[in-house]
Image (cartoon, helix red, strand yellow):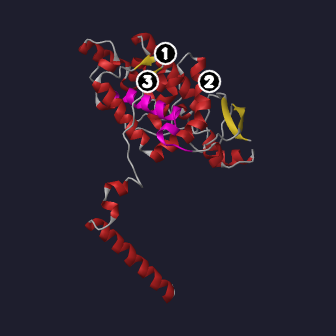
Amino acid sequence: MNKPYKFFVVVGIIFLAGFFINAISGDSNLQDPKSMSKYYEIKALKMPKRMHFAGEYAPLKKKDIYERIDRELLVNAYWQSNGLLMFKRAHKYFPVIEPILKKNGIPNDFKYLALIESGLQNVTSPAGAKGFWQIMKGTGREYGMEINDNVDERYHLEKSTQVACDYLKESKQRFGTWTLAAAAYNAGNTGISNRLEQQQVKSYYDLLLNSETSRYLPRILAVKEILTHPKKYGFSFEEDDLYRLEKSYEIKLDTAVTDFAGFSKKFDMNYKELKILNPWLRERHLNNKSRREYTIKIKK
């Protein structure tokens, strides 16, 4: 670094230090709330008059329900970076999820359940649940998923969405409402059934639950509200800012694969690109001793 440049850097540092010292000591106008509000303002959010999940309205007149939903609106609206990522990923993955929900007679609002479960990422919970829909190993196998070191279909978006639909339909038949079915997705059918019996109530909104499950529906409602009305909550973006799925086509495979890196090259792509399109393939090879037929996505 030359001497003139060093001089200007030192002067700049001294100037900034003086500015912040004045601000802290109260000499700066930035200490004046009226002056601060010109630059930054944190507003209380107006609660919508009506909010519903799958056509079932939340009892906003109940103070505890109002406060729980208000909390989730504040947390998710003012967590701006995460909010923008929700919009970006939803644009990418909701078009895959929505038709499967519709085909199974599951209300479209359940796409927001997947969003709050995983952020639409193939994550693993501390309890071992995996994928967009956070499916446990036992549940996945119960519903016919292949789960082993070689293949884990909990990471298969279409198949995991179908399993989630099957689970939700059973919960709806058991409890009678989509709201309780959603709560049971978090706490388990047995857990919700036991709480309803113990507390002698019939509605999710009347149950005393642990922190995670008590926040579950309010969080879904808040995320739905924000994603439905982005400008209302200060989110600004253009179509080009949003994520899109990689274009692909499908092939059938009923043999073993010794090396997916070499396999990928045959289709003019690399190993990383293959795994992004097929995250359910967990290893660099495919055993397939049973000669099962798999559908694999290939980059166009």
Dot 2 amino acid type? Pro
User: Where is residue 259 shown, x and y percent of the image?
Assistant: 65, 46
Q: Secondary structure at mark 2?
A: helix
Q: Relative to 10, is 26 on the left or the right?
A: left
Going by the numbered disc 3, the residue's amino acid type is: Met
- Chain-order first, disc 2 or disc 1: 2
Residue that protrudes farthest toward the bottom in the picture: 3
Q: Nearer the viewer, residue 128 or 78?
A: 78
Q: Which mark is residue 99?
A: 2
Q: Quadrant of the C terminus?
A: top right
**Residue 103, x across and y down, in percent:** 61, 18
Q: Secondary structure at mark 1?
A: helix
Identified at 59% across, 19% down, the residue is: 102
Which is nearer the N-term, disc 1 or disc 3?
3
Marks 2 and 1, how far apart in space? 16 Å
Query: Looking at the image, is 139 positioned above or below residue 299?
Result: above
Q: Considering only order in the chain, which callout, 3 or 2, is on the residue closer to the N terminus?
A: 3
Label placed on residue 51: 3
Q: Are marks 1 and 3 in contact (CB under 8 Å)?
A: no
Residue at 42% across, 18% down: 57
Label 1 – label 3 distance at C-alpha: 23 Å
Q: Is residue 270 above or below residue 173?
A: below
**Dot label at residue 169:** 1
Q: Are marks 2 and 1 in contact (CB under 8 Å)?
A: no
Which residue type does callout 1 highlight?
Answer: Lys
